[in-house]
Amino acid sequence: QVQLVESGGGLVQPGGSLRLSCAASGSTFMFDAMGWYRQAPGKQRDLVAAISDGGLTNYPDSVKGRFTISRDNAKNTVYLQMNSLKPEDTAVYYCKGDYRRYVYWGQGTQVTVSS
């Protein structure tokens, strides 16, 4: 059974940094696209960053220049480096992996930006 497990969330002050990791287990394949999404209370789940199997990246304007997504295909792991964090970045962050017509989600990790 394929599972995505996120780690690295926590509480950080405004202006601080966090690095999230998402490791895949139980898979014998390399994901096509991988990405990070976030969901704040009462809001929809939105894309934060995406990366193709070839390394092409995509970010919404709200995080562009502050967040960086990367992946280690040998480890089937994707990372999200988050810098200059703002209170509005507070949310549960989810990892997503696409393989052919299948979509896999992690369980989420809480990121709280507060002083």
Image (tube, rainbow, N blue to C red):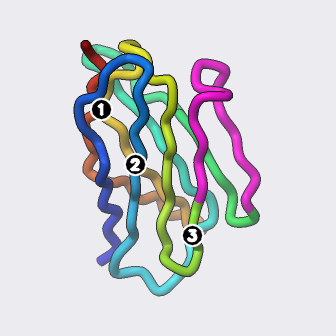
Under circle 2, the secondary element is strand
Which residue is tagged 2?
A: 20
Q: Are marks 1 and 2 in contact (CB under 8 Å)?
A: yes
User: What's the mark number on residue 79?
Assistant: none
Residue 59: quarter of image: top right
Q: Position of residue 60 (x, y in %)?
A: 64, 26
In the figure, 86 relative to 37: above or below? above
Q: Are marks 1 and 3 in contact (CB under 8 Å)?
A: no
- State the quadrant of the N terminus: bottom left
Q: Is residue 68 on the magenta stretch?
A: yes
Q: Residue at x 58, y 62 (%)?
A: 71
Q: Position of residue 66 (x, y in %)?
A: 59, 29
Distance from disc 1 to disc 2, alpha carbons, whole Å, reads 9 Å
68 on left or right of 83? right
Q: Residue at x 34, y 76 (%)?
A: 25
Which residue is tagged 3?
A: 72
Q: Position of residue 42 (x, y in %)?
A: 28, 14
In the figure, 86 relative to 18: above or below? above
Amino acid residing under circle 3: Asp
Amino acid residing under circle 2: Leu
Which stretch appears magenta? Answer: 55-70
Which residue is tagged 1?
A: 111
